[in-house]
Image (spheres, rainbow, N blue to C red):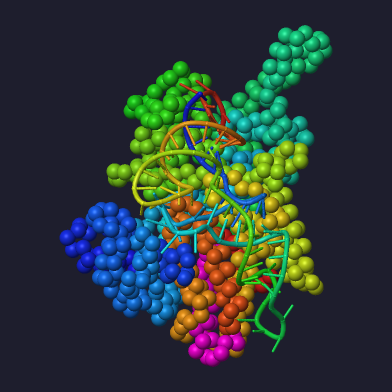
Amino acid sequence: MVLISEALRRAYERAFPDAEGDGFDPLVTPSRRAELGDYQSNCAMPLGKRLRMAPREVAARLIEHLDPGDLLEAVGEGNIAGPGFINLRLRGDALARLLVEMDTAGLGVGEPDHPETVVVDLVGVNLAKQMHVGHLRSTIIGDAISRLFARLGHRVIRQNHVGDWGLPIAMVTAKVMELRDAGAIDLDRLTLDDLDRLYRQAQSECAADTRGLEAARRYGLGPKAIAELEEQVAGAEAALKRAKQTLIDLQARRASTMEVWRRISEITMRECLAICHELNVEISEADSAGESSYAEELGPMVEDLLARGVAEVDDGAVVVRVEGFEQPCLIRKSDGGFLYATTDIAAIRRRVQEMGADEVVYCVDARQSLHFDLVFGAARKAGYATRPGHDHPSRLRHAAFGMVLGEDHRPFRTRSGENVRLRALLDEALARARGVVRAKNPGIDEASCEEIARGVAVAAMRHADLSNDRVKDYVFSFERMLAFEGNTGPYLQYALVRVRKILAEAEQRGMSTGGAIHIEDASERALALTLLRYPGTLVGACEALEPHRVVGYLYDLATVFSTFYDRCHVLHAEDERVRSSRLRLCRVFERVLADGLGVLGIPALARM
RNA sequence: GCGCCCGUAGCUCAACUGGAUAGAGCGCUGGCCUCCGGAGCCAGAGGUUGCAGGUUCGAAUCCUGCCGGGCGUGCCA
């Protein structure tokens, strides 16, 4: 496509020597319909407007000056269609040559002109809480986007912005300390399930039912009811007081409190990383940067912003006004406390100014978009988004995603209305995958079944999440993602297994897979053209932060291969020349598919 | 009230950033196993892209206004 664009550019310069050359865009895209050509250029229409000429005439002059070289089949009037589309077809030998050139470790993906440092914000778990569906998309999309940037040669730093600070965490810490002191729990045996329960218990204990009490008084409910409510409110106030004291202790890094907090953190993070590992998400302990790690910076940062006039006091609180938004970004409450926006601004400062991010990508729920607009605006206004020595702020982007819905199209919940735990989701996917694997492979041994089922379950879940347009909500369905027909993870895995089987067989028989390629059958041509689209697809997906483009591409690729596989025998090809060409095609396909699955974090299986 | 997002086949989703006749899978109809794994391939039916205007050679895509749905909207994170 690049070569075709270049050829068109040269044609343009020859055809219109008087026109200024800088504004020319060849507008080359793969043709949507194979019978018309391999590629099309749509440049004649806008050019006609600019040059005040009929688009078809522009197209004719371009064609006239277009040198097909050894790249394109002969061109003429017949290549012009409709209002001025230019349809082009690659020569078979050029197609073969391009494919061979692509058959390298990089698969046609070049080093970037300017390698960048990209910080990707993903996962975002909270201490003392189980991961649930709410974390699924951030984790999987964030991982895929990280892999994409890394694949294109950028330096990626993953950041798990753990919710490990603030009053809610203090509440559960206080609760754990209280129960430990009462001898009711043993810190060494505490599980995340326990913590999850205590978290919620602490939340409700601290929530005073003052409205209920007022209502009871107003409507004159019995003294017994009022007394009960008074007791509840008093209890809540006491619990809240303890939590606030615990928060103060945490902020002062008091050893005895920190010890408990650290234990809570360990328990949470161990499980979080275990689940990430099971989902084939590349993240480690070193990638965690909790809110607690910013705690000391917040006070001075707000003072800095006030001193420089970036922030102002309003109604007792400190705010940063952001141009274009009615509501300001609130960074300090009137009681002196900080908010999550404050931490997020501090995180931008660290990521850009200390880590050297040229771009920060936030893989966070779409509901936070206003929050990020404000935080990004405030950080830019403060100069925190600009790297030292640079004159432009780094790119701050919110890769917003929609919700996971149940099959009833309502937010995915358990029957009792709770968030579905990721652990439960994984377990069910695994159980269903086992069932299917066993059904497809009667008599398979236990260990193999388990191994394949794990790979299939992860592929199904990751693919389901990554195959939809990121910003839209999507309907979660085990049924569909494990159906193994159509655009699913297992289908892509299967395509890889099939081609690998052929390559392994060829190798065993001592056949060459590195021979020359001869494109003859239409299905070979379609496969070759699709393979060539790979590098461009990765670049486009990365620019748009849209992994689903890679998924869509791989599905196209796999179906095109399936057609080829059906029409063209490889191992039983008519002769040695054809066989070795097809084996080479298989090899390029295998490399691209495996590479693409790697970008998506979908495990490749040896057999299924 | 204001702001953001989403409305595409019966269902679940695409459409390469404005291109030609809007494509897949499921489901439905009908073909293809003496050959590399049928978790497959081929064909058919199924559409006023929520509605109405506008921009232009050309709109699912951009603009305006409606209609539906979701989510946010200064002292929770």
The answer to whether residue A10 is left or right of residue A412 is left
| Percent coordinates x, y for residue A492 in the rendering | 60, 66
Residue most extreme to the bottom: A575
Q: Residue B52 at what x, y percent from top left?
A: 49, 38
Viewport quadrant of the C terminus of chain A: bottom right
Q: Is residue A188 visible?
A: no
Q: Nearer the viewer, residue A119 or A558?
A: A558
**In the visual, does A350 lie left or right of A25?**
right
- Taking depth in this image into account, of A84 and A264 the one nearest to the observer is A84
| Residue at screen point 82% across, 12% down | A224
Looking at the picture, does residue A314 appear above or below residue A591? Answer: above
Please tell me which residue lies in front, A366 or A276. Answer: A366
How far from the left and from the top, in percent, is residue A34? 47, 69
Magenta residues, as a range? A571-598
Give the residue furthest to the left.
Answer: A18
Q: Is residue A241 left or right of A383 when viewed as pictured?
A: right
Up-down relation of residue A197 to residue A561 (above or below): above
Determine whether A158 is above or below A365 in the image: below
Magenta stretch containing residue A575, yes or no? yes
Q: In which quarter of the image is the N terminus of chain A?
A: bottom left
A302 in magenta: no
Q: Residue at x 77, y 8 (%)?
A: A220
Relative vertical location of residue A462 with respect to residue A395 in this rendering, above or below:
below
Residue A597 occupies which quadrant of the picture?
bottom right
Query: What is the total number of numbered labels drawn onto the structure image?
Result: 0
Quarter holding residue A346: top left
Q: Which residue is drawn at 30% across and 64% down?
A: A59
Along the viewing direction, whichever of B24 and A130 lies nearer the viewer: B24
| Position of residue A227 measured from the top left corner of the image (x, y, whole percent) | 78, 13
Q: Residue at x 61, y 48 (%)?
A: A474
